Image: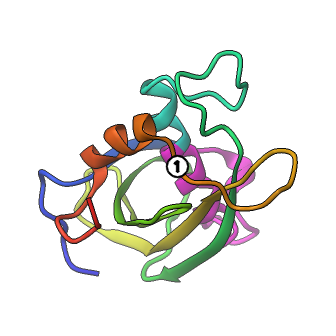
Amino acid sequence: MQEPPAEVGCTQRVQIHLDDLDFLGMVHNSRHALFVERAVTAFWQEQGWSADPGRSRYRDTHLVVREFLVTYEEPIRGTGDVGVWFRISRLGRTSVTYEFQVRSAEGRRVHAHGHRVQVRIDPETLQPLAFSDELRNTARRLMAASAGR
């Protein structure tokens, strides 16, 4: 994955805890997905999103992950912080695709990269449901030029 333009996307700092490490003292491979989840959730919470429909600024509260792909480039050793950069590469009617990079705290090394596809669902039928205009308007801040604004 190439270095993203500075003006597109968001970087959230995520803390690595001792229980994120494997027996070799490196971040366990399963944790990279968790770091991305924490970063994306933190962004949306800062915008007023909540999983609780009674507290959320958005009607889009029921979201599920359809696909998660991670490519590992360099191990992360020990505890501390990483920067998780992400942007929206595609915003469809019912699904959104995030590109991401898990980077060193200073942002110079990419430890892992990939994409994550999320789908909004109806809480009763569990069928895909179109994103609200409110969420789409906020999502534009994270969108690459080719993301289908």
28 drawn magenta = yes
Q: Is residue 98 above or below residue 132?
A: below
Which residue is outermost to the top?
Answer: 55
Task: Give the side of residue 3 with respect to residue 116, left or right.
Answer: left
User: Image point 57% across, 79% down: which residue?
Assistant: 69
Residue 15 shows in the view = no
Q: Is residue 139 above or below residue 55?
A: below
Task: Give the side of residue 67 with respect to residue 105, left or right.
Answer: right
User: Image point 63% across, 27% down: which residue?
Assistant: 50
Where residue 149 sits in the image (x, y, percent)?
Answer: 26, 58
Q: Is residue 111 above or below residue 131?
A: below
Residue that numbered label 1 is attached to: 131
Front in this rendered view, residue 88 or 32:
88
Numbered disc 1: secondary structure:
loop
In magenta, the rendered stretch is: 15-40
Residue 122 shows in the view = yes
Q: Residues within 10 Å of mark 1 (few under 14, many from 20)?
A: many
User: Image point 43% across, 78% down: which residue?
Assistant: 74
Task: Give the side of residue 94 with respect to residue 142, left or right.
Answer: right
User: Image point 67% across, 71% down: which residue?
Assistant: 66
Front in this rendered view, residue 118 or 21:
118
Task: Give the side of residue 33 with respect to residue 144, left or right.
Answer: right
Which residue is outermost to the right?
Answer: 124
Front in this rendered view, residue 4 or 138:
138
Residue type at the position of mark 1: Phe
43 drawn magenta = no
Where residue 100 sits in the image (x, y, percent)?
Answer: 40, 65
Where residue 51 sits in the image (x, y, percent)?
Answer: 69, 32
